[in-house]
Amino acid sequence: MSVFSDINNTTEKASHIGERYVKASHQYFKLKVFQQLTVSISLLAKVLAIGILLFAGLVFFSVAGAIELSNALDSYSLGFFLVGLIYILVSIIIYLMRAKFNPFIIKKLGPKFFD
């Protein structure tokens, strides 16, 4: 009977070790999800804050540039048209280069996500 009791004890130990492993893995994954979530939310908040301020600055620079061009060309409509045309050209260039953004983003976020 000692063989059966040894097998029973070994099985109970293995079961206990397995349960501890599952609990530890569960805790690890919860912490990992929490870390990724906080990093993502923090990054989003920073991007939003900086993006809003940059957008406001860009609007002011655009209006100031359009007014200066208008004064130089003696035509308000032509000055504002040229500023709008510059934005359209920059947008087209960014659109044509859109495939280059994915590898850059993956290289920047990959180490943080898989750390």
Image (cartoon, rainbow, N blue to C red):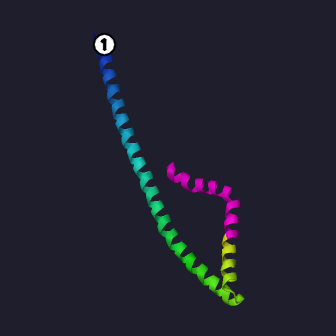
Give neighbour class at mark 1: few <14, some 14-19, many 20+ (Cα, 10 Å).
few
Work out whether 92 lies above or below 37: below
The answer to which image quadrant residue 55 occupies is bottom right
Work out whether 114 lies above or below 101: above
Taking the image as shown, residue 10 lies to the left or right of residue 88, namely left
The answer to which image quadrant residue 75 occupies is bottom right
Q: Quadrant of the N terminus?
A: top left
Q: Which residues are magenta?
A: 88-115
Query: Toward the viewer: 79 or 102?
Result: 79
Secondary structure at numbered mark 1 = helix
Q: Residue at x 47, y 60 (%)?
A: 44
Magenta stretch, main secondary structure class: helix
Work out whether 73 lies above or below 84: below
On the image, the x and y values in percent for residue 59 come to: 56, 77
Q: Which residue is mark 1?
A: 4
Query: Toward the viewer: 96 or 47?
Result: 96
On the image, the x and y values in percent for residue 3 come to: 32, 12
Magenta span has 98? Answer: yes
Work out whether 16 lies above or below 61: above
Q: Residue at x 54, y 52 (%)?
A: 111
